[in-house]
Every structure is written in structure tokens, then in C-alpha cells.
Image (tube, rainbow, N blue to C red):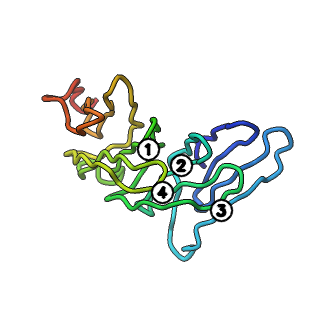
Amino acid sequence: MTSPVVHNDAVFFAGISSTIFSLNVESGARNWSWKDPRTNQNLFLVGGPVVSDSLVYIGGSSQHNAKAFNTLTGRFVWESPVDFRIFNSPAVDSSFIILGTGDTFDPAAYGSLIAIDKCTGITKARLRTTYGINSIPVSAGGKIFFGDNNGTVYAVDRQQFYAFGAPVIDLGGE
């Protein structure tokens, strides 16, 4: 199960059953749930949901995509394909959801930092990394900060989507 997130009077979470839930905070009653219709596949929702405005966003690890739902009704809004698994929660800023992709089963596999338009689900930018990204990106001061599976921390210009020179910190796999 993912970590829950509370927004207004609802708590949102998902699980390995490929279902996202919204429960009433006071009563615990189900507001809505959405199960991926591709139930014959092994579809996991591992990274926790994030809420911004009237949408809840979540990345699918086995599905290789991000999804958005209406917080009040549970209506499916969009799905955006990505290049690899998502094992983290997305970050949300004024325009984008920002997430990292990678593989915990093969830590040496590449990854990507991806910015997706939070209203349309259209991928706006992608930065390929040598190793996967399982950390949660942070957007602050016009930059996006994240770490890869090799212990390297990056700072990326939010507007141009390029990494600033050398990594900010190289922890050498610690």
C-alpha cells in the first residue's frame, strides 16, 4: 500500500491491487475507488498519490505511466506513458507533475526525470539519467532537485530542463 495523503475531507491511497481509493476522513466511508481495468496484468501502484487543485496524481510502477483523477468524483482524467517504472510519488508545482523513473530490480538501469503537464497529461520535458530515479523530486527556486540510484544528487533548471554542470553532490553510492 502507498502512503496516504489527506486533502480537504478525503484521504487517498493505492495498493498492489492496482486500485486507488478515496475515503471520508471522518467516517472512513468510501467516497470512490478506481481499479485499473487491465486486471489480467500484474499492475502495481507503489508511489503515493499527490493532490493539487482538484486532481489526484499517481504513478504506476508496473504500468509505466502516470494517472490523474478528479478528487471529488474519482473520474479518470488522463494517463501519460513514461519510459520505465515509477517507484516514487510525483512532485507537483504550478504547471507540472515531476517524477523520476527507474528500476529497483536493476539499479544500474537508466532512468528519466519527466515533467508532465498537470492538466493535460502531455509530457513536456524529459532528462535521461545514467541510473534510475527512485527518490521524490523537489521543485524549488526555479530548480528541480533529485537523487539517482547511484547516490548522485542533481539540480535541474525547471524552465530549460537541463542539469547544471556536474552533479550537486556525489555520495558514491552511499
Q: Position of residue 40 (x, y in %)?
A: 54, 77
Q: Position of residue 26 (x, y in %)?
A: 84, 38
Q: Residue at x 79, y 44 (%)?
A: 24
Q: Is residue 69 left or right of residue 100?
A: right
Q: CA distance from mark 4 to mark 3?
A: 13 Å
Q: CA distance from mark 3 to mark 2?
A: 13 Å
Which residue does the numbered mark 3 point to in the structure image?
34
Which residue does the numbered mark 2 point to in the structure image?
57
Which residue does the numbered mark 4 point to in the structure image?
60
* Mark 1 nearby-residue class (10 Å; few <14, some 14–19, many ≥20): many
Residues marked 1 and 2 touching at CB (< 8 Å): yes
Residues marked 4 and 2 touching at CB (< 8 Å): no
Foreground mark, 1 or 4, reads: 1
Q: Residue at x 63, y 56 (%)?
A: 20
Residue type at mark 3 is Trp
Q: CA distance from mark 1 to mark 2?
A: 8 Å
Residue type at mark 4 is Gly
Q: Position of residue 120 (x, y in %)?
A: 46, 55
Under circle 4, the secondary element is strand
Foreground mark, 3 or 1, reads: 1
Q: Which mark is residue 97?
A: 1
Mark 3 vs 1, N-terminal side:
3
Pick the front one: 55 or 36 = 55
